Image (tube, helix red, strand yellow):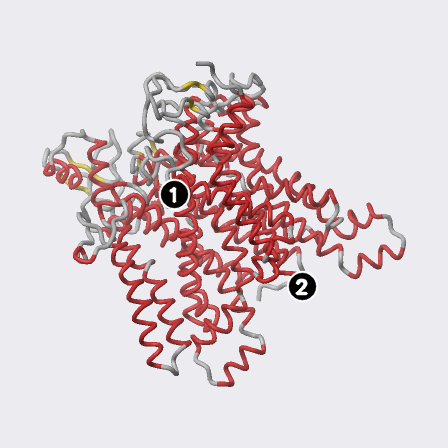
Amino acid sequence: MGQFILRRVGLMLITSICLTFIVFFLTNLFPNLEKLAKTQGNFRMSEAEVTSFLEDRGYLQPLPIKYAQWLGVLPGYVIEGKDGTVRGKCIKPGMLQEDAARFCGVLQGDWGYSTVFKDDIGKLVLIRLSLTGKLMFWVMLLMIPSALIIGILAGMREGSRTDRTLSTISITTTATPEYVSGVIFIAVFSSTAFGLKWFKGTAAKAMEDANFENFFLPVLTIALYGMGYIARMTRASMAEVMTAQYIRTARLKGVSFANIVIKHALRNALIAPFTVIMLQFPWLLNGVVIVETLFNYKGFGWVLVQAAGNNDIELLLAVSAVSVVVVLLTQLISDIGYVYLNPRISVT
Amino acid sequence: MEALTWAEILSRMFYQLTPVWISMIALFTISIYYKRNLGLYGKLFDSKIGTLGFAIVMFWVFVGFFAGALDMISTHDPLAQVSGMKNKIPGTPFRGAEEGDYAFYLLGGDHLARDVFSRVMDGASIIIVIAPLATLFAFMVGITLGLPAGYFGGKLDTLLSFLANLILAFPVILLFYLLVTPEIRMTGLPQYMAIFLFSFPILFFAVLINTRYYIEPQKRNVLMLIVVGFLSYLYLSLINEPGTKVTIFNAIDGFDVPGGLLTVFVSVVFVNSPTVFRIVRGLTLDIKTRDYVSAAQTRGEGAWYIMLWEILPNARGPLIVDFCLRIGYTTILLGTLGFFGLGLDPESPNWGATINEGRKLLSIYPHPALPPAFALLSLVLGLNLLADGLREESLKD
C-alpha cells in the first residue's frame, strides 16, 4: 500500500510539472505578453516600448529558465532596466536589492505577485479558496445525501413507477448545465417579472454573511448538475445488488424489505457511488467557475476567470497548480478508498 | 396594434414551425412503418424514452436545417437591431412594420433590440452542425489512438494514457481560456493543433481501406485514391487560411472557416478525445480476450485488421450510446464557451452567448435569456433520452 501511494504521488508530481509547464508555455507566447505589457503599461505603447517593458521585467528570458525561476530551482533574475531602475523577481515593491533572497519560487513558498490584484498570490489564492470551500461544503451537504436517496429509492425496485419518475428527474438534471439552471432559477425566484422574490439573484453578500436567502440558489445550481449523475450511478449499483443471491436468501428467510435494503443491500451498493462522488470534484470545479461568475461570488472560480481574462501569468499558474492538485488528489483518494471499501480488490 | 396574448404567441410559433412538423410527421411515419427492417434504429421506436428523445433531437435538427439552410422559420434577421424594440416583452408588435415584415416580436426583444425568437431558431443551426461534427472528430482521434493502446499495451499504452490523463486533469474552462483567445489565434497554435488532430480521420480511413482490401490491390488503390484524396482536400482547405500562419495551400483552399470557429472546434475536439480514448481503450482490453480475436490471430490476420474489423464492430453498442451522450456534452461545452464570451462571435446567435447577454438584466427582463436556456436544455435532454433508449434496446439482443 505504501509503495502504491508513493508511486501515485510521484506520478502526481510529474503531472503537475507537465501541466504547469504547458500553462507557462501558453501564457508566455508573445501575443499574450504583448497584451500583458499593454494592460500594465498603456495601450498606446509602440513595439519597441513593449519589448523594453518586457525585457526589463524578465519576460523575454528563454522559457525553461523562466520556468525554473518560477519553480525556484534557479536564482531569480535581477535586471537593470533601460530606465535605470533595477528590477528582480525576488525584489518586492518597497524592498532593497540587497535584502532580496536569491531564490524565490514555488519551492520557497513564494507564488509570486498578481499583476491584476496587486497582491501576494499565496495569500490571495488562500482567501479565495476558503470562500469556494464554503460553497463546496454546502454543495456536498445538499448533493450527496439527496443523490444517494434518489438513487437508492429508484434502484431498490427496478422498473417500478418510482424508479421511472426518479430516473427521468436525474436525466433531466444531468442535461441541465449550471448556466442554464442558474439563469432559470434567478429568473423564476428572484426577478420582478415573475414576482416571486424568494431568493437573492446575487451571492456577493454571501462572502461575509451567508444565509439561506442569498446562498441557496448558487448551492442548488451546482448541486443539481452533479446530483443526477451520482443518483444514476447509485441506482445502477443498487439495482445490481438487489438481484444478488444473498438478497434473495434474506428475502426467503423472511427479513422485511426495509431491513434488506438498509442492512444488507446498502453497504455493497454504496461502493461504486463513492468513487463517482470523488471523481465529481473536477466537474464541480467547472460548475464553480460558472456559478461564481453568474452569482458574482468572488471565490476561486472567479479568480480563475479574472486571471485568464487579464493574462495574469503567475496567478494563472497558481490557480492551475491548485486545481490540478485537487483533481489528482481526489483521484488518489478515490482509488485508496475503493480498496478499503471493497476488500476483493487489491492495489497490486 | 395590440400586443399578443400568450395563447396567440404559442399558436403563431406553432404555425411558424410548420415545415418542422411536416418533416417530423413524415420521418416518423416512414420510420415506424419500416421499423422491422431498420436494425437498431428501428428498434429505437419500441422504447418510449428513446422515441421521445429522438423526437426532441430531430425537432432541433429540422429547426436548424430550415432556419439555417433555407431561412424559413425565423421571423426577423437575428442580427438586426430595431429602434424601439429594446427589452420589449414577448408578443410586442413590431414597430414601423412595413410590407413583408413580420408584425410581431414573438418572444420579445433583447437588450440590443434584436428578435429573441429568430435568434434562438438560428442558434440551432450552429449547434446541430458543430456539435456532432466535433464529436465525430473526437471519436476518430480517440478510436485511432485507443485501439492500439488497448491492443498492444506496453509502453505505447503507458505513454498515451499518461497524455490522456494529463489533458483530463486540466479544468476544462482553464483550457478554454488558454486556447480560445484572439492572442493565441495570432500565434497560429490552434491551426497547428488542427493540423495534428484533423489528420487522424485521414489516417483512420486509410488504414481501414488498406486492411480490408489488402489482397485486392487494384480495388484498394482506386478506393484509397478517391477517399483519401477527397479527405485530404477537405483537410487542407480546413487548416489553410489566407492571412494566417498556415498559407502554403492557398492555391487549393476550397473554403474558409472563420478563425474563431476553427479555434472553438479544435479545442472542443481536444477536450473530448481523451475521454473517448479511455472508453475505446477499455473496450479493446475487454474484447481482445474473446475467442473470435484469437481465431483471427491464428488465421494470421494483421494487427490493424483485427483492431478495425474484429474489435471495433463489436464495440459499436457502447460507442453509439456514448456518441449520443457526448454530442450533448459538446453542446454544453459550446454553450459554456458562449457563456464566457470566448471563441464564437458574440454577435452570432449561438445559445450560450445569447444566455450570457440575457443574464445581465435577468432580474428585470428574464425573457431574452430563458428561451435559449430552455432550447439548450431540451436538446441535451433529448440526446440523453435517446442514448438511454439506445442503451436499453442494444442490451436486449
Query: For the view shown, which residue lies furthest in the right direction?
Result: A254
Query: Which residue is found at the position 50% from the left and 82% from the top?
Result: B297
Disc 1 residue type (three-letter): Leu
Q: Which of A224 and A163 is in front in this view?
A: A163
Horizontal side of B17 relative to A70 (left or right) equals: right
- Position of B93 relative to B157 (above/below): above
x and y percent of residue B189 in the render? Answer: 26, 51
How many numbered marks does the figure carry? 2
Q: Which of A264 and A147 is in front in this view?
A: A147
Rendered image: mark on residue B174: 1
**Label 1, label 2: how far apart the Cα atoms are:** 38 Å
x and y percent of residue B120 in the render? Answer: 43, 34
- Position of A52 relative to A247 (above/below): above
Q: Quadrant for the N terminus of chain A, please.
A: bottom right
Q: How crowded is mark 1: few (under 14 residues within 10 Å), some or many (20 or more)?
A: many
Asked if the residue under mark 2 is in contact with the one under mark 1, i.e. CB atoms within 8 Å, the reply is: no
Q: Are marks 1 and 2 on the same chain?
A: no
**Which chain does the residue under circle 2 lie in?**
A
Query: For the view shown, which residue lies furthest in the top direction?
Result: B1
Query: Which residue is found at the position 53% from the left and 63% from the top?
Result: B316
Q: Nearer the viewer, mark 1 or mark 2?
A: 1
Q: What element carries label 1?
A: helix
Residue B173: quadrant of the picture:
top left
Read off the residue under disc 2. A344
Let me know if residue A161 appears in the view.
yes
x and y percent of residue B293 in the render? Answer: 53, 77
Disc 2 residue type (three-letter): Arg
x and y percent of residue A290 in the render? Answer: 45, 35
Q: Residues within 10 Å of mark 2 (few under 14, many from 20)?
A: few
